[in-house]
Amino acid sequence: MAAPIRALATFEQVLEAVADDALCAERERAQLTLDSIGDAVISTDKEGRVAYLNATAEKMTGWSRNEAWGRLLPDVFRTIDADTREAAPNPVEFSARRNSLTGLARHCILVRRDGAEADIEDSIARILDREGNAMGAVMVVRDVTDARLRAVQLSHLAHHDVLTDLPNRVLLRDRLDQAIALAQRHRRQVAVLYLDLDHFKHVNDSLGHAVGDQVLREVSNRLSAAVRRSDTVSRRGGDEFVVLLSEVEHTRHATRHAEKIQAALSPPHIIDEHQVRMNVSIGISVFPADGHDAETLVACADAAMYEAKASGRNTYRFFAARPIGDDA
């Protein structure tokens, strides 16, 4: 009778060994899968201590799997708010309160172990046993630094002139709308200066477009330096610019800005050993006297600019030849 018993025991051991091999193979396959994906995977136990990091998570956090094991999640996965620079809420605790699949707060930054930072997005889900009891949580984290940088760059390109990097007409319209709304509340005025460089075509024809572009960039720099930080210098296109004076108490202040701009542009521009002198004709419109919306104010300033050119160039004119200093 002893032999059959030994045979049965041996058979059970074989079954256990096979099961162990299958389990090991399954675990190894799962490990290889997790380590091959591009997102970081971090799991915690029910106390919020790190139980697992895949290879991407190790690289992203700067912590190895063995070093991170058993540590509280905020020690390994340190996040801050991009705007306030304050510590962001613990994502696992936040997920537990919501009892659902959640994500980090908007625009969260992960601070690596070495202090380097990365913009991240993630999703967090609780791990439940068969009875529905919480066993921990799993996070899937993605580094979106490059994606957010590209989004910022695309947004900048959509609102700025490629040649001069000045606000374009889209951004000018937005700022002018805001300036008008603010002026209405505080019973102030807004001035729009429409600038056109005199005889700029001669620069392109005689010196080439490369020099012309350099002149436009130099003009942009001088215009930006000649106005207040609260004002906006925009390139309208070609050799035309628009300056928004966001707060103007009297129209004579717009006059001073026009004269300051002309003085700033009058010294010669030294471009590739060429001395290029540029004069500018300026048309001025004022809210609310000349219009109550951005489109009307720009059109009025444009019309006044043509009046300035017709009167001999290198001068400025208010819309409808409104007397300087008249604040009606």
Image (tube, rainbow, N blue to C red):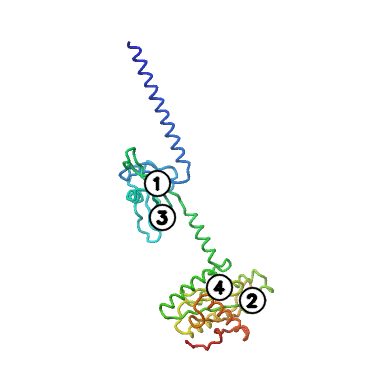
N-term-proximal mark, 4 vs 1: 1
Check contact, mark 2 vs mark 4: CB within 8 A. no
Q: Which mark is residue 150?
A: none
Residue for badge 2: 200
Q: How far separated are the C-alphas under marks 4 and 3?
A: 35 Å
Q: Which mark is residue 139?
A: 1
**Where does the image place residue 322, in percent across and percent down from the top left?**
53, 87
Vertical arrangement, residue 61 with respect to residue 185, above or below: above
Amino acid type, mark 2: Phe
Instruction: Give SS at disc 1.
Output: strand
**Where does the image place residue 107, in percent across and percent down from the top left?**
42, 57
Decide: few, some or many residues near mark 4? Use Cα within 10 Å; few <14, some 14-19, many ≥20.
many
Q: How far separated are the C-alphas under marks 4 and 1?
A: 49 Å
Q: How far separated are the C-alphas under marks 1 and 3?
A: 15 Å
Instruction: Give SS at disc 3.
Output: strand
Amino acid type, mark 1: Met
